[in-house]
Structure formats: structure tokens, C-alpha cells
Image: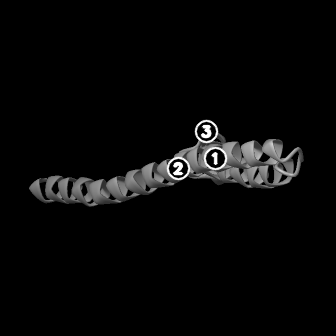
Amino acid sequence: MLRSTAINHTDTNSARPDLERIARRRAGAKMGWYIHAFVYVLVNVGLVTISAANGHSWAMYPLMGWGLGLLIHGAVIWLLAPGGGFYDRLLERERRALGAGDRG
């Protein structure tokens, strides 16, 4: 009985570093997206200002292209990455499907 308690205690402690590592990775990825969005806004405000001062509208091209990249980056971080709502729902559905298949 003591041995199983020790094993459970060890398993819990070994899981904590994994959770910490995952949490740090997710927080770093989200921070990277915030930095990306900040630089996007800052640079594109400058490009729009330069474009408008010269009487041209070329700034919309980098705005749209980079905006698409920012949108994809955000979708990967906020929707598809582990811990994102969409990913968690899909994972739970797969777990239920696999559990139902084992019973039948």
C-alpha cells in the first residue's frame, strides 16, 4: 500500500514539469502573437502615413498581406494549438469516440 502511494506521488510530480513546460510554451506562443500584432499596427500606421503623404494607396497591399499572415498566426495560436477551445473540443470528441469503440 505504501508503495502504490509513493508511485502515485512520483507520477504526480513528474507530470508537473510537463504541465509547466506546456504552459510556458503556450504563454510564449501567445506573447509572440501579441508582439506580432503590435509590430503590425506600428509598421502599417507608418506605411499608411507615408503612402497618404505621397498621394498613393500602395500601403493597402502590405496591410492586407501581412494582415492575412497575422490572422493565420492568430488562428493557429488561439484556435488550433493545444489548449485552444477548438482543439480541446475535437480532442474530447475523439476521446469519447475511442472510448465508445472500446465498449462495443
Task: Say which label, 3 or 2, has the lower sequence index.
Answer: 2
For image coordinates 73% across by 52% down, the residue present is 72
The residues tagged by marks 1 and 3 sit, at their Cα atoms, a distance apart of 6 Å
Image check: 38 left or right of 21? right
Which disc, if any, is residue 30?
none
CB contact under 8 Å: marks 1 and 3: yes
How far across and how far down the image is residue 61, in percent? 86, 53
- The image position of residue 59, as x and y in percent, is 82, 49
Name the residue beneath numbered marker 2: 35
Name which of mark 1 and mark 2 comes first in the sequence.
2
Identify the secondary structure beneath mark 2.
helix
Name the front one of labels 1 and 2. 2
Q: Is residue 32 visible from the viewing direction of this image?
A: yes
- Secondary structure, mark 1, is helix
Residue under numbered circle 1: 87
**Along the horizontal axis of the image, is 23 left or right of 8?**
right
Callout 3 environment at 10 Å: few (<14), some (14 to 19), or many (20+)? few
